[in-house]
Amino acid sequence: MNRHPFPFLLGVVVLFFSASFKQPQADAAIGGAPMIVLSLSGDMFSQSRVYLSKLGMRITCKQGYALWFTAEPKNVWLVNPDNKTYLIESFEKYAKDEQSEYGPNNYIFKDSPEIEVLTGSEFKVRLRRYTNYLEGTDKHAPNFAKLKRTRRKAEVVYIDDQPIPDEVKKHWCALVGLTGNELSPRTNGLPVGLGRRIKKKWMGIKRFTTVREKWLQILELKAFANQPLDSKIYAKPVGYKPAKDKTSLYLSGDGNMKDADIEEFFQRRL
């Protein structure tokens, strides 16, 4: 039986702690409330880094980054540093687009969580993993410990005791699709992992489609840090041009899609 419910995180987070927390604890108070930095992988953001603080959220990934400000809660700034353009869209639309592959996660987790305390340097992180299992799973069976990862139906992982404002937690949960009553931001808890079985259409060899359930790891925590607040992380882009739409934001050279941009993307003349 695996004695550690989070064996991979144990090694990665401890290493990240050792590399990240050279400054004394007093330094973290210089900028006021601290800034939480999450290194994530998974189906939603792929390889990404998320910054959470009293100022808002920044999600950085290979397409650029998104900025949501607590002072402007209705909108998100989508920024592409490659072509120095940005697009402002509603937070509601941004969240809906990010969840388009799998929809909201509205499961209610009734059983007690598995808990692990990860220790690194002078810091400790407590993780709680809540899991729903497929119907018919006998959790008291002798082989349950061996089969439990293949019998999962949904799962969410929280970091405990993180001083992130409720408004920021609320929007982070809304972004990743945690909408059930049991999945609302728990007291001092920050959701950092999410997986569940998703019904998706699959194309068969004979060109027919079928609907099957497949486990997707939507969010997976790779590393975690509690750092001093850096307001430059949340600075709006200066000297950038507004993009006409999302296609222009990511595919054009200057925020306005042209035939030349399409030709460059497909590497052929139209």
Image (spheres, helix red, strand yellow):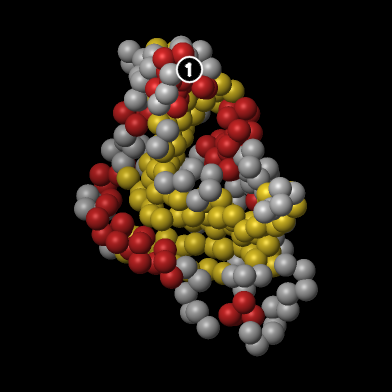
Would residue 116 appear left or right of 100 to someone viewing this image?
Answer: left
Horizontal and vertical percent for residue 211?
75, 52
Residue nearest the observer in this picture, 196 or 193: 196
Q: Is residue 220 left or right of residue 147?
A: left
Question: For the view shown, which residue lies furthest in the bottom direction?
Answer: 142
Residue occupied by mark 1: 270
Q: What residue type is labelled 1?
A: Leu
All told, the count of numbered labels is 1
Residue appearing at x 58%, y 80% in the figure: 146
Viewer-side residue, 180 vs 147: 147
Q: Is mark 1 on a helix, strand or loop?
A: loop
* Residue 147 in which image quadrant: bottom right
Q: Which residue is drawn at 29% across and 61% down?
A: 15
Question: Can residue 55 be seen in this snapshot?
Answer: no
x 24%, y 55%: residue: 19
The residue at 57%/63% (across/down) is 129
Point out residue 170 in the picture as x, y percentages from the top left corner.
Answer: 59, 39
In the depicted structure, whether residue 63 falls above or below residue 139:
above
Query: Callout 1: few (<14), some (14-19), or many (20+) C-alpha neighbours within 10 Å?
Result: few
Specify whether residue 159 is in view: yes
Residue 92 image offset from top left, x and y in percent: 63, 28
Lateral position of residue 38 relative to residue 246, left or right: left
